Image: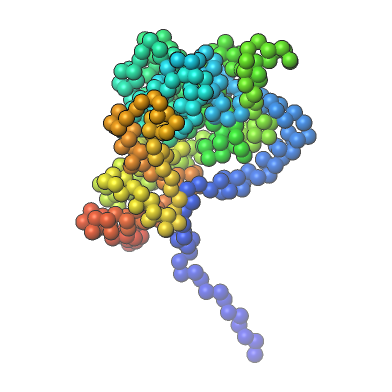
Amino acid sequence: MTKTPKMPMENPDPRPPAPQGVPLLDLKRQHAPLREQMAAALAEALDDGRFVLGPEVTRLEENVAKYCRVPHAIGCASGSDALLLALMACDIGPGDEVILPSFTFFATASAVTRLGGRPVFADIDPASFNMDPAAVESLISPATKAILPVHLFGQCAPMDALCRIAKAADVPVIEDAAQAIGAEWDGVRAGALGDMGCFSFYPTKNLGGAGDGGMLTTAKADLDDKLRLLRGHGMRPRYYHEVVGINSRLDSFQAAVLNIKLAHLDRWTAMRQANAARYHEMFATAGLDRVLGLPSAGSRCRHAWNQYVVRVPNGRRDRLRKHLGEAKIGTEIYYPLGLHAQQCFAHLGYGPGDLPETDRAAEEVLALPIFPELTAAEQALVVEQTAAFFHAATGGHAIPRPNFLKRTAARKKTA
């Protein structure tokens, strides 16, 4: 008698298993479907043999200029060099003051200092983390030679007000757009709002390469010419030097990778925006908006969401980060100390209370995973673990028990 083969049992729950952790960033997910395209582009650049400022760099410059809606884009070796080159193009030198935020990455201020200039730190707006125009206006002096706003975490600074201040002072505006490619203010792209825009292609950026790389943008032909001269030792023609420049040239391999990835940038930005909206809904459902400061996009902004940064008040930030780390959830603190409080800038004379909003942000901010390929289940785990922390921290008075998202989903399914 022939035995009937046993049929495999149906999975009673076809949903994917719950995540066991959440990385802060996972570039492997982004690169896997592009691997063959990128390999082919690198092979083409290898066969071409022009490895520095080759055809792929020219093509990337054209593509970025078109994307940022400006006439000119100039490739360079890094975002830090982009800032340095922009300041050099403005002839910043010893004794010149440049107004910039203290709440930013070190490169923004170090570029000023390397040229002998003096960083003048402005406080920030607590909602956007971007430079406060009122603070900037109060710092204008006869020594002011440029204003350098940072479009932090993917959201543009209030450029209309900052450009008005700059125009009245007759100084240029240099945008630090390292975290904000594709962001907009009143429909105008980052990099097209000031005299020059500075971009980074560091791998963790929304448009990241496979190493370092940078780009400058400008609408002014004279600045385009000057920046191209400065990035190549001030040399034109070969071995004849008009000015003392630097060596900051973009590699063709990096440009090849970036040309492939740029075509997907708007889709990835939309995925980041969807993740930010989902976080907001999940945090509100959990009641966590009562104990956390949630980020938001300004009404005049297209937010690119390079980072999703919450505020954790009442001295609980580090404990929450430790709790999430134990649950294998990646986080980061951007930034634990304002630049005005860094040891290397002690000679500038800033003290406690000089930039209160910067100091408060440095004590409260915590970046959560926001990369495009982040799943809803991973976001649920982030929110549930955050709820678990606050449930324990408040004795259950402010936040309901953990696993609220699963219960909410079950109620919706049976309703």
Would residue 75 be seen by someone viewing this image from the given angle?
yes
In percent of width and height, residue 203 lies at 56, 39
Judge left or right: residue 271 versus residue 34.
left
Residue 79 in which image quadrant: top right
Examine the image and state in which quarter residue 102 appears: top left
Q: Is residue 39 above or below residue 93?
A: below
x then y, percent, for residue 56:
68, 29
- Answer with left or right where residue 389 lies relative to residue 14: left
Seen in the picture, residue 348 relative to 195 is either above or below; the reply is below
Q: Residue furthest front?
A: 347
- What residue sits 47% from the left and 42% below the top? 271
Residue placed furthest toward the left: 397
Q: Please tell me which residue lies in front, 71 or 321.
A: 321
The residue located at (56%, 26%) in the rendering is: 81
Residue at the spot x=36%, y=38% of the render?
362
Query: For the N terminus, which image quadrant?
Result: bottom right
Image coords of residue 157 (percent x, y): 39, 26
- Residue 263 in view: no
| x, y percent for residue 34 | 63, 43
